[in-house]
Amino acid sequence: MKNLIAPLTALSLMATEACAQPDQQIRVSNVGTQRAIQGAAENFTGAVRVEGLFKGDAPARIGGGTVTFEPGARTAWHTHPLGQTLIVTAGVGYVQQAGGVRQEIRPGDTVWIPAHVRHWHGATATHGMTHIAIAEAEDGKAVTWAEHVTDAEYAGASTPAGQ
Ligand code: MN
């Protein structure tokens, strides 16, 4: 057993040394040290707060933040060039893709939105909702914004695919 483990350990150490840059340090961003950002009115309807923004260093493309929607608040229609993952942490919300049905999402639910799929996400009319949003950037861009979600669309009216 010892003879088997020793070479494996040596191999994994070599791999680590080959990849890590000597000046790379783990970076902890402590909660409460970053000012909350209000969601811009051109991209959201209602009160939306973004906290805990994070972004990996290149060549990593990962980035995101924790987004809180007050009741009735939602994103505008938008797409992500490389898709998006949502992890719901509080409240009750909706996610809907163009041409699809509005789906209810709750804490513990995870959502994968494929690349270039037009969609919106937000709170229900009666409950707020918080999710962690994670997306990879393509050429430095992680989202393409479109029109606001109308009250009729938000209320669950069917939407034409691709519209
Ligand atoms: Mn999205």
Image: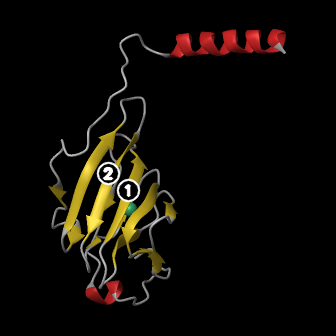
Question: Quadrant holding ligand 1?
Answer: bottom left
x, y (%) of residue 137? 38, 44
Q: In the picture provided, is 20 more to the left or to the right than 6?
A: left
From this view, report whether residue 139 is shown above or below residue 94: above
Query: To which residue does mark 2 refer?
Result: 65
Q: Quadrant of residue 151?
A: bottom left
Q: Residue 34 versus residue 1: which sits nearer the camera?
A: 1
Q: In the picture provided, is 40 more to the left or to the right than 72?
A: left
What's the amino acid at mark 1? Ile
x, y (%) of residue 128? 29, 74
x, y (%) of residue 127? 31, 80
Q: Do the residues labelled 1 and 2 touch (CB within 8 Å)?
A: yes
From this view, report whether residue 133 is shown above or below residue 119: above
Residue drawn at point x = 29 percent, y = 78 percent: 149
For label 1, the crowd category at 10 Å Cα-Cα, with few meaning under 14, some 14 to 19 and many 20 or more, is: many
Secondary element under disc 1, as helix, strand or loop, is strand
Q: Residue 113 versus residue 87: which sits nearer the camera?
A: 87
Secondary element under disc 2, as helix, strand or loop, is strand
What's the amino acid at mark 2? Gly
Query: To which residue does mark 1 refer?
Result: 132
Residue drawn at point x = 36 percent, y = 30 percent: 57
